[in-house]
Amino acid sequence: MRYRRAIRWLLPGLVVKRWMVTSGMGLLIALLGGAIWADLRPIYWAVELLFSLLGAITTFLPQSITGPVVLVIGAVLLLWGQSRSFGSIQQALAPDKDTVLVDALRAKSKRNRGPNIVAIGGGTGLASLLKGLKRYSSHITAIVTVADDGGSSGILRRELGVQPPGDIRNCLAALSTEEPLLTRLFQYRFSSGRGLEGHSFGNLFLSALTAITGNLETAITASSRVLAVQGQVVPATNVDVRLWAELENGERIEGESAIGKSLQPIVRIGCYPEKPPALPRAVEAIENSELILLGPGSLYTSLLPNLLVPEIVEAIQRSNAPKLYICNLMTQPGETDGLDVAGHVRAIEAQLATLGITKRIFNSILAQNDLDESPLVDYYRSRGAEPVICDHRMLRSAGYQVTQAPLQGLRATPTLRHDPRSLSIAIMRFFRKYKRET
């Protein structure tokens, strides 16, 4: 096993061999310089010694045997020395990590060659997506909604005047490559304590950093260094926005938490103030993207709030990158009751129409294969949720490119949510197919 690992160091893409060769050349040149300085006498001595040694060896064994034996001994010593050297380096840098250094370098090399991906959304759906995508690329930008006003985020928003940190915290934890214990600490939620109960450590940490640095964007950058985040997390806007929704009966309700509990179908949403400005880093990431993703996540409270920022929508429109909408597995009671995949798409287009945009932005759709009946599906039905049906024939006839895949994963799970690995595999297959066809 040790020698197999040593041989893996010779595989392409690790950016190790070139520096080993460079070091070897440097050593030879330095020795040559020393020999020249000494009037070439060391070279003569070395050549004479080498010939004497070879003559002595071939006296006992013929060249046909001596050559291969010496070659094998040299190769074994080289591989053994290399294995021991890099093992010592790993022991010094990461003594507690199980990943072999060569495997970690190969994985990093693969991720560094990955595409520039922009994922737009919020909530647990975006965090699940990021967990899977970070296996394929180091160039990920998560653009996150900052409209949350419930739970710990809502309390901190009201009492400290900071932007809600909850969705941002989830994304930072999802993209973290640091020790699992540190990530668990960031996600830890206090279950007791006066004033602390219900708050997560990460929310308090981000809120404190925001107060210290003066803005959430700088706080996120500092937190990203602490968690060794692979990519970047960017708020959709740095303005304190508040959502409102217009219902089918003409009523208007305010607040993200109230919208998610609506008893009437939602017609459209908006925010105060209108047309909030985007962060320049979010716009820049979209302009440089090779793949743009929207979803999965709550349609009206996680996805569409990002599209209320005109500069983000305009940047998506200008981009030539493929744009993929990832639909939810199940409907959400009070938010998307009765909507199939086409209904979700119509809601996105209707929202964009309020900004004067009539041309489709997301022409490609990724949806779950039809879910089989199961006790888990029945349980969700008892709580008011239904599987989101995908009529792929109707959508394709309307000009959409539809991909269906087992996004929940092949193994049984206690919840009906996107499996990060299955979701990222389907997305990368879509991207590779797009690259082949263009």
Image (cartoon, rainbow, N blue to C red):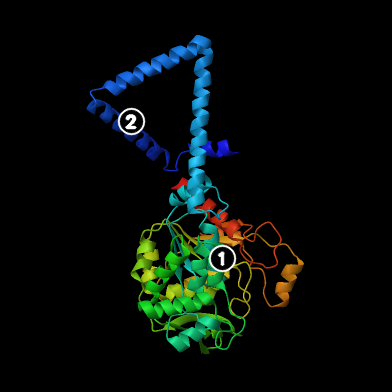
Q: Is residue 145 left or right of residue 212?
A: right
Question: How far across and how far down the image is residue 361, in percent?
Answer: 44, 64
Q: Is residue 389 left or right of residue 229?
A: right
| Badge 1 element | helix
Which kind of residue does numbered mark 1 sit on? Leu
Q: Read off the residue under disc 1.
A: 181
Mark pair 2, 1: CA separation: 46 Å
**Residue 34 is at least partly visible in this image:** yes
Q: How many dots with numbers?
A: 2
In this view, 207 is above or below 93: below
In this view, 247 is above or below 132: below
**Residue 275 is at least partly visible in this image:** no
Q: Quadrant of residue 240?
A: bottom left
Of 257 and 158, the residue lying toward us: 158
| Residue at position x 52%, y 39% in the image | 83
Of 66 and 262, the residue lying toward us: 66
Of 171 and 187, the residue lying toward us: 187
For mark 2, does the 10 Å Cα neighbourhood hold few (<14), some (14 to 19), or many (20 or more) residues? few
Q: Quadrant of residue 211?
A: bottom left
In this view, 77 is above or below 297: above
Q: Earlier in the sequence, mark 2 or mark 1?
A: 2
Q: Is residue 48 left or right of residue 386?
A: left
Question: How far across and how far down the image is residue 360, in percent?
Answer: 45, 65
Question: How far across and how far down the image is residue 419, in percent?
Answer: 61, 61
Q: Are marks 2 and 1 in contact (CB under 8 Å)?
A: no
Of 301 and 386, the residue lying toward us: 301
Which kind of residue does numbered mark 2 sit on? Leu
| Badge 2 element | helix
| Image mark for residue 28 | 2
Question: For the residues carrying marks 2 and 1, which lies nearer the camera in this image?
Answer: 2
| Residue at position x 61%, y 69% in the image | 340
